DNA sequence: GTTCCACGGGAAACGGAGGGGG
DNA sequence: CCCCCTCCGTTTCCCGTGGAAC
């Protein structure tokens, strides 16, 4: 496989002039294909300049539709422009709720964000009561004064623990804060987030909504073109590279992020192959590569229980006993757990793990219904090559031995041959 | 139309690991 | 020291559902 090569790191021919425009954190100076949304956004923020009461603003749209980038753009303009007016005092706080699953955690993150900018001590993520954290938060906000724009990115992560959205807009009318006017900008990937909020929150949360629809292929091309021009040397990109990236991304998610990653990956593949141009073929390879990585990461991030369930399914796959119904899979799973000297979870919980893995695209599910006494049941099989599951399991502590057993079982049944060719 | 089954969503609760604060 | 807080994966219930067989 891998061998040391002399001059392994010698500089390749460069296809990239400046890869930064293809980075996730790159902020373009103009935002394309979002004129209507930006105009609405600007109107929604206007009252801040006019010193009028401002509604909270919610942006809805799937990932990669420009919500975050539009917000960064609007806020930096807003900050610049408020500097002109002495009577407008504006601060902004930005919290990404990506890993925060409750209002409590969001409140802690907000406090820490506010304190961080003033070099005060952070507070820990557990230990306080919720009300205590909210009180600390109100104190910090009050100390800032003026208008504070609070951006809660990926706010749908908090699910139905939405107290923070009740508390913040009412902080002033409830007398928790005196000198500060909070404006919440919520960014959500989930269109139904609003509908699932509790009724008391819906009542208090006067909001303006802005929808960010997915991009189509034409729009993605228009977004990619200026970045591609900056990122690559002249004449490196073949004419069909950008349109193909746009087409793939438009078909799948309509996400600009996906299109950009695809283009970067294609560039990296072309560079690695020491090619002068980035071709259609490189884009196709990049698409495969990214898909594979996503599945691989999905598998690695499973919990021990998830790995055990996956391992059980892999065993059935190696025995060529697929699709397998969950009750048979469960028996295998229990045996695997006792072999590993690990606790086994209930059948109900195993079904949850299976449905998680189905969501990740790791496994296939078939619904069967045999009526009267056989009833309704599901059957499962792997949706990724057995070989790649084994690769992950071999790398996972506690599972190496089992992975080897499964591997030799699969070898006996000649089930790995075809997988190698698809992979 | 009725009957039957496993599925899967939901709710409540648990327990042990994070950590307050007096 | 003790009693308080939240979090997470889980258990243990309950219940509505689809659809072939009766």
Image (cartoon, coloured by chain):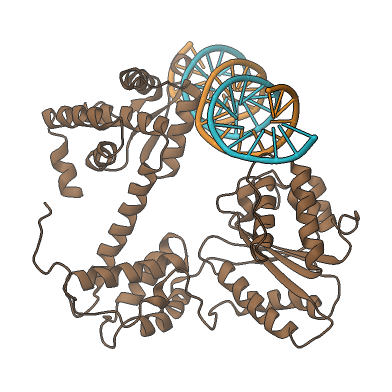
Chain colours: A brown, B cyan, C orange
Query: Is A240 located above or below residue A126 in the figure?
Result: below
Quadrant housing residue A113: bottom right
Rendered residue at 53%/80% (across/down)? A32
Query: Is A410 located above or below residue A248 in the figure?
Result: above
Horizontal arrangement in the rendering, residue A187 relative to residue A265 (left or right): right
Camera-side residue of A342 and A409: A342
Q: Position of residue A141 (x, y in %)?
A: 78, 62
Rendered residue at 65%/63% (across/down)? A119
Camera-side residue of A403 and A358: A403
Horizontal arrangement in the rendering, residue A361 relative to residue A148 (left or right): left
Horizontal arrangement in the rendering, residue A224 relative to residue A212 (left or right): left
Tag count: 0
Query: Is A105 located above or below residue A266 in the figure?
Result: above
Q: Position of residue A411 (x, y in %)?
A: 13, 32
Horizontal arrangement in the rendering, residue A423 relative to residue A310 (left or right): left
Quadrant housing residue C14: top right
Camera-side residue of A188 and B15: B15
Camera-side residue of A106 and A232: A106
Q: Position of residue A11 (x, y in %)?
A: 19, 76
Rendered residue at 65%/66% (across/down)? A117
The answer to whether residue A323 of the structure is visible from this angle is: no
Q: Position of residue A190 (x, y in %)?
A: 60, 54
Quadrant housing residue A120: bottom right
The answer to whether residue A337 of the structure is visible from this angle is: yes
């Amino acid at each position: 496989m891998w061998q040391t090569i002399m001059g392994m790191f010698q500089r390749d021919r460069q296809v990239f002039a400046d890869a930064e425009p293809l980075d996730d954190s790159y902020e373009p100076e103009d935002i394309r294909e979002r004129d209507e949304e930006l105009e609405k956004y600007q109107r929604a923020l206007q009252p801040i300049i006019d010193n009028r009461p401002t509604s909270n603003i919610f942006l809805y749209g799937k990932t990669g539709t420009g919500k975050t980038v539009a917000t960064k753009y609007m806020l930096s303009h807003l900050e610049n422009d408020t500097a002109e007016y002495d009577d407008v005092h504006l601060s902004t706080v930005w919290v990404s709720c990506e890993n925060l699953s409750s209002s409590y955690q969001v409140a802690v993150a907000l406090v820490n964000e506010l304190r961080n900018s003033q070099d005060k001590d952070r507070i820990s993520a557990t230990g306080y009561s919720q009300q205590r954290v909210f009180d600390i938060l109100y104190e910090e906000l009050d100390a800032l004064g003026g208008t504070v724009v609070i951006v809660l990115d990926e706010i749908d992560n908090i699910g139905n623990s939405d107290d923070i959205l009740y508390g913040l807009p009412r902080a002033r009318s409830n007398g928790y804060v005196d000198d500060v006017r909070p404006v919440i900008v919520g960014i959500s990937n989930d269109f139904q987030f609003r509908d699932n909020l509790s009724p008391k929150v819906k009542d208090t949360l006067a909001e303006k909504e802005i929808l960010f629809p997915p991009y189509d292929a034409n729009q993605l091309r228009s977004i990619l073109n200026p970045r591609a021009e900056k990122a690559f040397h002249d004449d490196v990109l073949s004419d069909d590279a950008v349109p193909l990236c746009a087409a793939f991304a438009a078909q799948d998610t309509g996400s600009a992020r996906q299109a950009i990653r695809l283009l970067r990956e294609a560039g990296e593949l072309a560079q690695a192959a020491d090619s002068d141009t980035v071709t259609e073929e490189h884009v196709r390879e990049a698409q495969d590569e990214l898909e594979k990585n996503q599945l691989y990461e999905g598998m690695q991030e499973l919990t021990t229980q998830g790995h055990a369930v996956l391992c059980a399914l892999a065993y059935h796959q190696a025995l060529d006993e697929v699709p397998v119904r969950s009750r048979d899979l469960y028996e295998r799973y229990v045996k695997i757990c006792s072999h590993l000297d690990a606790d086994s979870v209930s059948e109900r919980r195993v079904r949850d793990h299976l449905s998680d893995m189905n969501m990740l695209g790791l496994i296939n599910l078939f619904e069967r219904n045999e009526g009267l006494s056989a009833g309704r049941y599901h059957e499962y099989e792997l949706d990724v090559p057995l070989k790649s599951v084994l690769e992950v399991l071999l790398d996972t502590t506690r599972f190496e031995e089992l992975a080897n057993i499964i591997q030799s079982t699969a070898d006996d049944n000649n089930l790995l041959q075809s997988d190698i060719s698809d992979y």
